Image (cartoon, rainbow, N blue to C red):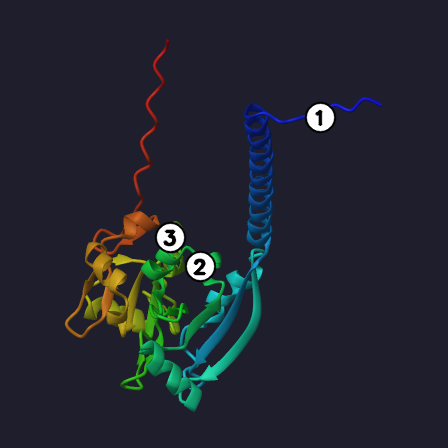
């Protein structure tokens, strides 16, 4: 048998090195692509999981008229993208409660502290703008507690107020003054007491004379309304604040509907909205 000895030339060695390098490069590239796909898949799977939250409710049991924190919790529980893994109620005067108040600088109760996947569950910037703050440990703390609430420093309940609906039973066309409830709710205001007085009643006639009311129906508010800055900003455009601190709705009846002008004895109906302009013909 004739054997041929193959002696690789420099060119062959360079070609071999080039091919080997290409194979290694492809292997590295393939691994990198697989790793990227795997990482993206894990990220997608993680994003698809509900955000897990732990809730601490700082309660004030003695304040039965205070804001109900469950109004904040209920939307969280109904959100499929959020999973509440624990819920703890802590009285604000307890040792743990006092420690939490000091740790997070809480001044109003009841309130809520959220921990866990807060960044995943919320737009934190929006939360901070509307509800509270993000603590150094990552917890979200509700500091803008809607009134009524208990002021920790003084122990006083802030934001309690009552509404008197001054009705006009003889005016069948007049608006229902209880429609003001919706307007107040839009300002996060819920009266702690409601009373109904007709203008023909003795109490009604007394209110009309005392506050020089010239149209009915209307509403009269009393109490700690300084706790509602948005209300205080809007109120001068629709009502007056009397010397004794009573708030009388006066200038906004036309926005609510028909009302009884007590000076003329006539029912004033709001003007119908203007008809839309006809579309130009092509």
Which residue in the structure is indicated by mark 3?
A: 175
Percent x, y of residue 96? 43, 87
**Outermost residue toward the front in this view:** 2
Whole-angstrom CA distance, mark 1 to mark 2, is 70 Å
For marks 3 and 2, the one nearer the N-term is 2
Mark 2 Cα within 10 Å, few/some/many (few <14, many 20+)? some
Neighbour tally class for label 1: few under 14, some 14-19, many 20 plus, Cα within 10 Å: few
Query: How far across and down, in percent of the image, does residue 19 sit?
Result: 59, 29
Q: Nearer the viewer, mark 1 or mark 2?
A: 1
Residue positioned 30% across, 48% down in the render: 255
Q: Secondary structure at mark 2?
A: helix
Q: Tell me the mark number nearer the camera, choosing from 3 and 2.
A: 2
- The residue pinned by badge 2 equals 119
Q: Is residue 253 left or right of residue 114?
A: left
How far, Cα to Cα, is label 1 from label 3?
A: 111 Å
Instruction: Name the residue beneath numbered marker 1.
Output: 5
């Amino acid at each position: 048998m004739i054997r041929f000895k193959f002696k690789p030339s420099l060119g062959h060695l360079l070609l071999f090195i080039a091919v080997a390098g290409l194979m290694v490069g492809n292997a590295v590239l393939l691994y990198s692509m697989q790793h990227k796909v795997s990482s993206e898949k894990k990220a997608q799977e993680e994003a698809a999981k509900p955000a897990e939250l732990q809730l601490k409710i700082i309660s004030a049991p003695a304040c039965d008229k205070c804001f109900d924190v469950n109004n904040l919790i209920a939307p969280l529980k109904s959100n499929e993208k959020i999973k509440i893994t624990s819920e703890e109620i802590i009285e604000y005067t307890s040792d743990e409660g006092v420690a939490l108040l000091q740790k997070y600088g809480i001044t109003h109760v009841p309130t809520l502290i959220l921990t866990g996947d807060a960044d995943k569950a919320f737009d934190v910037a929006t939360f901070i703008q509307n509800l509270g703050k993000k603590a150094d440990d990552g917890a979200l703390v509700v500091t803008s507690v809607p009134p009524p609430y208990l002021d920790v420093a003084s122990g006083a309940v802030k934001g309690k107020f009552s509404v008197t609906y001054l009705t006009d039973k003889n005016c069948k066309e007049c608006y229902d003054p209880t429609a003001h409830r919706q307007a107040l709710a839009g300002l996060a205001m819920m009266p702690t007491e409601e009373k109904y007085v007709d203008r023909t009643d003795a109490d009604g006639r007394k209110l009309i004379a005392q506050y020089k009311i010239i149209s009915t129906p209307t509403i009269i508010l009393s109490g700690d309304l300084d706790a509602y800055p948005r209300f205080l900003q809007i109120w001068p455009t629709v009502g007056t604040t009397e010397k004794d601190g009573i708030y009388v709705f006066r200038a906004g009846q036309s926005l609510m509907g028909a009302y009884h002008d007590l000076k003329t004895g006539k029912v004033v109906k709001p003007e119908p909205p203007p008809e839309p302009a006809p579309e130009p013909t092509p």
